[in-house]
Every structure is written in C-alpha cells, then in structure tokens.
Image: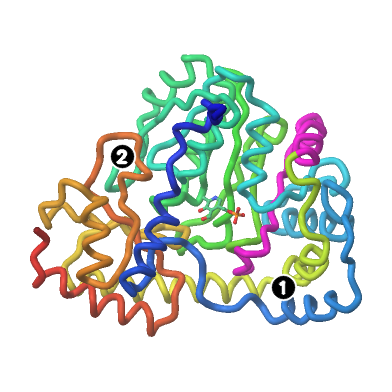
Amino acid sequence: MAELSVRTAGFTDSVIRRMTRVANAYGAINLSQGFPDFDPPHSITERLAGVALRGPHQYALTWGAQNFREALAAKHERFSGQKVDANKEIVVTCGSTEAMMAAMLSVVNPGDKVIVFSPFYENYGADAILSGAEPIYVPLNPPDFGFDGNVLEAAFKKGVKAVIVCNPSNPSGKVFTYEELKLIADLSKKYDAFVITDEVYEHIVYAPYKHIYMSTLPDMKERTIICNSLSKTYSITGWRLGYVIADERITDRIKKVHDFLTVGAAAPLMEAAVAGLEAGDDYYEELKAHYTHMRDLFLKGLSDIGLKFTKPQGAYYVMVDVSPFGVKDDVDFSEWMARKIGVAPVPGSSFFREDIHDYVRFHFAKSDEILNKAIERLALLQEKKYR
Ligand SMILES: Cc1ncc(COP(=O)(O)O)c(C=O)c1O
C-alpha cells in the first residue's frame, strides 16, 4: 500500500478530545474540553429559527456575508476603539481554528520560524506542522506565567517570521499586560515579524484585568493578524464562526487561502449570529459576571479542599498543581482521576513544551450543580491514594 503523508505522520490524537472519551467511558464529569454547558443568547437562537424558514441557505461570499462583516467591524470598533474596513480587512472563517491556519499558511514559508509561548493551545503545534513552520518556544513560567524578555529577544534573533500571542491565554489564564504586549510589539518591529493573536477569550477577563488589543499598540495594526471567534463570546462553539482582522495586504492573501480551505462559513449561521454581534454592553457585562461567578465558585471549592492553583485572569481554565500527590506522569494521573475520582481534567504536559508534569487543567464553564459535584468528588483526592 502507498504510504500516508510524512508531514502528518507525527500527529497524535488531540489529548483534550481523548480525555473527553475517557470521561465518557468512566462516567466522569468532563472538565477537560472547553465548552459551556449553557445556551447561547436567546436573540441568536430566535433569529436562527427564522433563518431556518427564510434562508439564506446557499453559499455566502467566500470571505463572509456583508451584514455579518459589517456587524463584526462595528463590534470590534466598539471594544477596541479601532476602525476596521468590513470589506477589506475582515475574513470570516470556520472558527478561529481555521483563522489561525489560514493566517499561518498566508505568512509562513516552509522552514520559517514562529515563536509560540509555552504552555500553548495545542492546535498551534499542528498549525506549525501543516504550514511547515518551525516553532521556537518561549516559556511562560508557572506559577505566574511571566516570561523573560531576554529569552524572547533571543528567540526573535533566530530570525522569526511571526509570533503567536494567545491573549487571554489558554491554558494558563494569563492576560498579557500593556508592558508585556509593548515588549512583544517592539521586538516584532525591531526584527520585522508578524504578530498573530488569538483573542477568542477577549470578553472573558476577570477584574481588575483588562483585555488590550495588540493591534492598538503604536504602529502595530499593519503587522498584527487578529484571529477571533464567536465560539466563546456567544457560547456557540458548534457553529464554527471565526474571523481574521488584518490589513488589506494580509487579508487579500488570507481570503484566497480561506477560499481553497473551506470556501466559507455557514451562511444561515452567520445570518443568525448577527443578533449576537449587535448585543448591547449589558450582554458582555452579564457574560463577565457569569464567568466571574463560575470561576469564584470553582476556585473557592479548590481552595477549601487544599488544592494549589494559579488564579486565572482570563479565559475559563485553571491549572492545578498536582505535584503534592507525588505525580510523575500527569497523563496517567488524569486518567486515574477520571476513573477513581470521577472528574476528568486535561494533563498539563500536553500544553507545555518544557518537561513539566506538575499540572492538570480544568475548565469551569459549567452550571453550579456540576461545579459543586465536581468539587465534592475532588475532595476525595485527599483520601483515595494515587498509586
Ligand atoms: C485559545 C483558543 N483558540 C481557539 C480555540 C478554538 O476556537 P474556535 O471554536 O473558534 O475554532 C479555542 C478553543 O478551545 C481556544 O481555547
């Protein structure tokens, strides 16, 4: 038989999705894969019902329906203060997942180096392989997930084409400060690199932290490629609606890559999701309040049972330090937790490039009932001996 491709031979199953299968197999509470267990806003689902009868049901413009891009531009300007041309500077994609892939394929040549902060969202590894990029990892050091500017500059000095900045960050919950973004921005200008941002958690940021858009820093609009999505902001991870915002020179290329990758995002879903993009400020305030509530409830539970963790500043994950349980192999420990404790996390090592096995990641976009039940079960960690 003919051989399969060398490029993808190293791909492993997504650890996160594997932990979902493990959770299902043992009937464990699944705090591994990050999706909310509550409904999207009513305005969106109501509009979807109408769209089912009215349409559109055929292809939209490949880079996104006009009214959807205009709503995206208006919403982006409302929050970032930065004007975006809906016709020239936005490409609608199938989730931020495709946005990142299209961005990488559009700027990276095989062999080009791309900086990735570690721990990182696992898709960036696959994106690098598919685009032929060589990732240069810069550690975000636990427990506070800061980085060393000298290490970052040393990475830039290797001649990088782009740096990926996930802000707010999955899995660490880090929200980059202005000073940190400024440092990355200054280096990207000094060494002439693109900055590809992943801002899918822009609206899930806990006080007193604030989301700052990299593209709004001085002279950064022309070299920043924003990858973003409606998945998290409107609790519609299954709709696969994402987008890129960048200068026309870049979106011109991304439009073509996107056209050949997927042709376009789902026309009826774009039409329905416009209702979300038009939501008033109160929607985002309630979203933040809801996530703050879930975070506080879950973190209090973790504290009460004596677990150590880094308090997330944004996104909906928490990294828990499991080294006090004598963990050497966090993958084994995570599966043991699903089996014996009844709560499934993601082994932290799947996010780190470094040899770090001290963490597991939980997500907490769940109802009070599920979170309370998870805490009740996690309390058993102190009784049931691991190995
Ligand atoms: C950092 C980050 N980027 C992108 C995604 C995927 O976004 P989308 O559903 O828009 O493809 C996720 C999903 O968990 C994520 O955590």
Eye-nearest disc, 1 or 2: 2
Q: Secondary structure at mark 1?
A: loop
Examine the rendering and report whether any part of residue 247 can be seen. no
**Is residue 8 or residue 297 the one in the foreground?**
8
Q: Is residue 64 left or right of 159 when viewed as pictured?
A: right
Q: Is residue 24 left or right of 85 when viewed as pictured?
A: left
Examine the rendering and report whether any part of residue 112 can be seen. yes
The image shows residue 209 at horizontal and vertical percentages of 47, 57
Kind of residue sitting beneath label 1: Gly
Whether label 1 lies within 8 Å of ligand 1 gets the answer: no
Q: Secondary structure at mark 2?
A: loop
**Is residue 361 or residue 186 the one in the foreground?**
361
The image shows residue 213 at horizontal and vertical percentages of 61, 46
The image shows residue 211 at horizontal and vertical percentages of 55, 53
Q: Are marks 1 and 2 in contact (CB under 8 Å)?
A: no
Q: Is residue 294 left or right of 251 when viewed as pictured?
A: left
Residue placed under numbered mark 1 in the picture: 280
Residue 110 sits inside the magenta stretch = no
Residue placed under numbered mark 2 in the picture: 141
Residue 254 sits inside the magenta stretch = yes
- In this rendering, the answer to whether 188 lies above or below 370 is above
For label 1, the crowd category at 10 Å Cα-Cα, with few meaning under 14, some 14 to 19 and many 20 or more, is: few
Look at the image and give the residue range highlighted in magenta: 233-260
Taking the spot 26% from the left edge, 75% from the top edge, the residue there is: 301
Q: Is residue 220 left or right of 64 when viewed as pictured?
A: left
